[in-house]
Amino acid sequence: GAGVSQSPSNKVTEKGKDVELRCDPISGHTALYWYRQSLGQGLEFLIYFQGNSAPDKSGLPSDRFSAERTGGSVSTLTIQRTQQEDSAVYLCASSRVLGSGANVLTFGAGSRLTVL
Amino acid sequence: TQLLEQSPQFLSIQEGENLTVYCNSSSVFSSLQWYRQEPGEGPVLLVTVVTGGEVKKLKRLTFQFGDARKDSSLHITAAQPGDTGLYLCAGVRNTGKLIFGQGTTLQVKP
């Protein structure tokens, strides 16, 4: 597609349930990023996939969070046993250029998660 | 630990005023980027600065990268209501990983 697509755009869940958030990156982009953003705040790094290399998971806040990227394309961010503090907008981005000063990220519109 | 400190975090000014947003770090980055984000959307890249001391201009916006490649500034001349939004700086590691600052919310009143 022309841009990064994320689904669902909005998700309301009950505390303790599991949720899956999906990201379809731009075709041909080898790098994929997940960030979390609270209202009006900056982006908190979660995880970074770069080609076939092992992902950088250093930003995942707890073992309840995991992410996969299948076939070098679509990625799923899974949050198990959701807590109220997990409520935020989860943003996905992809880029073509790796390890370069010209690395240009294209972001999706985000998935807004609300945990009741 | 916040690797990139942005200031101010919130700025409310009148149309026509000038402003500067700062992005500071103790770390060296291979490059630094500035993004703008509007409500309900993802951030959109404004500029990338790569060389220490580099200055780039985008219409009324001027971006500067510090000589040591640890800090940057964004200056807006004669701000307009259309400039309202969240401005984010991001440091780029040589691995391609991006670390974002906390953001600066700018409100320009007509």
Image: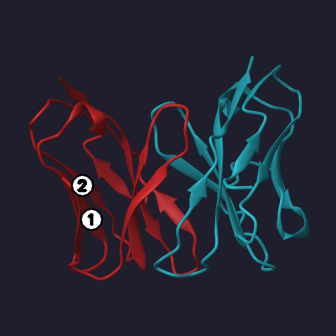
Mark identifier at residue A73: none
Q: Looking at this view, is B34 or B83 the one in front?
A: B83
Check disc 2 and report the residue beneath it: B22
Q: Which residue is found at the position 81% from the left and 46% from the top? A: A22
- Please say if the residues under marks 1 and 2 sit with CB atoms less than 8 Å apart: yes
Image quadrant where residue A82 sits: top right
Amino acid at the residue labelled 2: Tyr
Check disc 1: other Cα within 10 Å, few if <14, some if 14-19, many if 20+: many
Amino acid at the residue labelled 1: Ser
Please state the horizontal and vertical placement of residue A116, each as a whole percent of the image.
75, 16
Secondary structure state at the residue bearing disc 2: strand
Q: What colour has chain B? A: red
Considering only vertical position in the picture, is A19 above or below A45? above
Q: Identify the coloring.
A: by chain
Please state the horizontal and vertical placement of residue A29, each as a whole percent of the image.
70, 70
Q: Mark 2 belongs to which subunit?
A: B
* Placement of the C terminus of chain B among the 4 image quadrants: top left
Please state the horizontal and vertical placement of residue A109, each as a whole percent of the image.
62, 41
Q: What colour has chain A? A: cyan
B69 with respect to A37 (left or right): left
Secondary structure state at the residue bearing disc 1: strand
Please state the horizontal and vertical placement of residue B106, each as a whole percent of the image.
28, 36
Check disc 1 and report the residue beneath it: B72
Q: Which residue is found at the position 20% from the left and 79% from the top? A: B53
Decide which of tag 1 and tag 2 comes sooner along the chain.
2
Q: Which residue is found at the position 28% from the left and 67% from the top? A: B71
The answer as to whether the residues below labels 1 and 2 share one chain is: yes
Distance, label 1 to label 2, CA atoms, is 6 Å
Q: Residue furthest top?
A: A116
Q: Residue furthest front?
A: A2
